[in-house]
Image (cartoon, grey):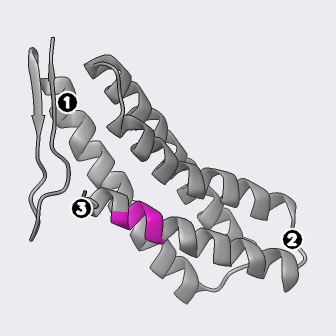
């Protein structure tokens, strides 16, 4: 099965988070903020993967809502790392742009899901299909 753009972006972001974590603990000797960043930044993609196996519309929305919250938390930690000079502006801008893009995708998916009353038939179009889920209530 071909990965969706949401899966791909979340996986790539998670890899960047792991690399950032290694940098923070090895080079900056920062453990607490690094662990928080690792936890929130990598959980987004895992929750999106869980949502693919949702048992109901409500379960799908719940899992994506938690992913959305985790992405927002990751954005918070990125800001804190930048403002405390653990990461430079260039790294922050790049990672924060990725994070904001993920938040925007999740926001769009959740908005679409919540607007539909009886059927979720979800497709986000870019140059290729992102997600296609269908639940009947």
Report the predominant secondary structure element of the magenta stretch.
Answer: helix
Dot label at residue 84: none
Q: Please provide the residue range marked out in magenta.
A: 8-12
- Foreground: disc 1 or disc 2: 1
Q: Is residue 48 magenta?
A: no
User: How far apart, in angstroms, are the residues tagged by discs 1 and 2?
Assistant: 39 Å
Secondary structure under tag 3 reads loop
Residue drawn at 11 percent across, 47 percent down? 123
Q: Is residue 9 magenta?
A: yes
Residue at image mark 1: 113
**Image-quadrant location for residue 115:** top left
**135 versus 19 height, above or below:** above
Residue drawn at 73 percent across, 54 percent down? 36
Asked if residue 89 lies left or right of residue 51, the reply is right
Nearest to N terminus: mark 1 or mark 3? 3
**74 versus 97 height, above or below:** above
**Image-quadrant location for residue 21:** bottom right
Residue drawn at 51 percent across, 48 percent down? 46
Image coordinates for residue 130, horizontal then vertical, percent: 19, 56
User: How far apart, in angstroms, are the residues tagged by discs 1 and 3?
Assistant: 22 Å
**Image-quadrant location for residue 37:** bottom right
Residue at image mark 3: 2
Residue at image mark 2: 30
Nearest to N terminus: mark 1 or mark 2? 2
Secondary structure under tag 1 reads helix
**43 versus 100 height, above or below:** above
């Amino acid at each position: 099965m071909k990965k969706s753009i949401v899966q791909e972006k979340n996986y790539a972001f998670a890899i960047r988070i792991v690399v950032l974590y290694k940098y923070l603990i090895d080079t900056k000797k920062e453990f607490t903020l690094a662990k928080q960043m690792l936890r929130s930044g990598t959980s987004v993609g895992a929750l999106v993967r869980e949502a693919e196996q949702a048992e109901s519309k409500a379960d799908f929305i719940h899992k994506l809502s938690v992913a959305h919250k985790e992405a927002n938390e990751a954005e918070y930690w990125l800001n804190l790392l930048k403002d405390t000079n653990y990461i430079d502006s260039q790294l922050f801008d790049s990672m924060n742009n990725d994070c904001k893009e993920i938040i925007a995708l999740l926001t769009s998916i959740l908005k679409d899901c919540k607007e539909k009353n009886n059927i979720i038939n979800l497709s986000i179009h870019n140059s290729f299909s992102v997600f296609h889920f269908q639940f009947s209530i």
